[in-house]
Amino acid sequence: MNISFDRAAENTVVVRIGGDWSIANGLPLMEEVEGRLGAQPAPARIVFDAGELGAWDSSLPAFLSKLTSYCAQKSIEVVRQGLPGGVARLLELAAAVPEKEDARREQRKAPFLSRVGEATLEVTESIGEMLAFIGEATVSFWRLLRGKARFRRSDLWVLIQECGAQALPIVSLISLLVGLILAFVGAIQLKLFGAQIYVADLVGIAMAREMGAMMTAIVMAGRTGAAFAAQLGTMEVNEEIDALKTLGISPMDFLVMPRMLALVLMLPLLCLYSNLMGILGGGLVGIGMLDISPVHYFLETKAALNLMQFAPGLIKAVVFGVMVAVAGCLRGMQCKRSASAVGEAATSSVVTAIIAIIVSDAILTVVFNQIGI
């Protein structure tokens, strides 16, 4: 590319444009162009001569647009007659569409107090929506008890299968590994005192009271809670929930209540199964590493556990089931109508459910300790 400035008359400058213009070669420096045009005496008009112009791409209109903007600031008239027809039309189109106001405004970080205020308002709004959802779910559950909730019983059985039988493989794997880890960590310390047999007590009590319910709930939060949020979010995007409302069917009864019932019913059963798999995992370590006979391990586990040891875990499992179901259904119902919002709803449901599980577990542990369970 080449460009030159020739003064044809006292108030006129001819801009001669030649060669091939390619965006790969960059644009001429505007500082040099401004220096040539700013020389005394300043021109009143600019005309173009593109007779030697070869191939060109978007770099030429971009340069001429900058040159035109500079001339407008300096009150210099620009005559486009010497330009190729395509370039002239592109410049006219660029001039016809004004630049949006504040398009080049730099993003400034909001003040600290402003950000705190916005976060507080968002949290307050989120808490209000959550309380409203829990209230609607309670009303829907009351309608269910009175036999007035409208949903398909077949959907409930399908959801029970998805939340129960289909979750057994992942619950088995996680619970077995948790039992192995607990037994391995305990075995290292108990070996120092020659008390290897108490690995059975450690694994059995930990799984029955705490780890079985918590690990099952976390697995279900990532597996089932996220699925609930994605399903309901997709229905919201496809306007299926609006269609139910138009037909006079409550989405809480038809969509949310079956999912909550399925998860609350299945999570305690999965918790019991998780306890069994964790004890088996601990038995593998005890029998394989500590040379404890299977009979001795079983008898020690039986002596350490009783029905009251399983009560805290089962109660926690019911509470965790409610937490996971509420988090998944709430985020799904809150989903906005875009494809990205469905993924955000699924992610948010998992985070919300895990936080609720940890907080409720801490509260229930303190309560059980106070009442002696």
Image (cartoon, grey):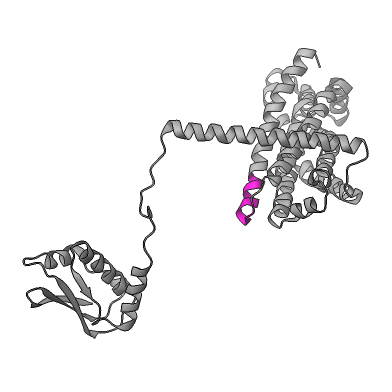
> Which image quarter: residue 320?
top right
In the picture shown, does residue 223 fall above or below 207? below
Q: Check residue 338 for magenta coloring.
A: yes
Name the residue at 11% across, 77% down.
6
Query: Chief secondary structure of the magenta span?
Result: helix
Furthest residue to the bottom? 51
Please state if 186 lies on the left or on the right of 298 as rendered.
Answer: left
The percent coordinates of residue 180 (x first, y second) are: 73, 35
Quadrant of the rendering where the N terminus is positioned? bottom left
The percent coordinates of residue 193 (x first, y second) are: 70, 17
The percent coordinates of residue 219 (x first, y second) are: 73, 41
Which sits in the foreground, 366 or 293? 366
Please state if 105 lies on the left or on the right of 327 as rendered.
Answer: left
Name the residue at 70% across, 51% down.
233
Which sits in the foreground, 370 or 83? 83
Name the residue at 36% across, 63% down.
98
In the picture shown, does residue 368 fall above or below 241? above
Q: Check residue 315 for magenta coloring.
A: no
Q: Which residues are magenta?
A: 337-347
Please state if 200 lies on the left or on the right of 58 as rendered.
Answer: right
Residue 272 in view? yes
Quadrant of the rendering where the C terminus is positioned? top right
> Which image quarter: residue 171?
top right
Please state if 128 lies on the left or on the right of 92 as rendered.
Answer: right
> Which image quarter: residue 190?
top right
The percent coordinates of residue 177 (x first, y second) are: 73, 38
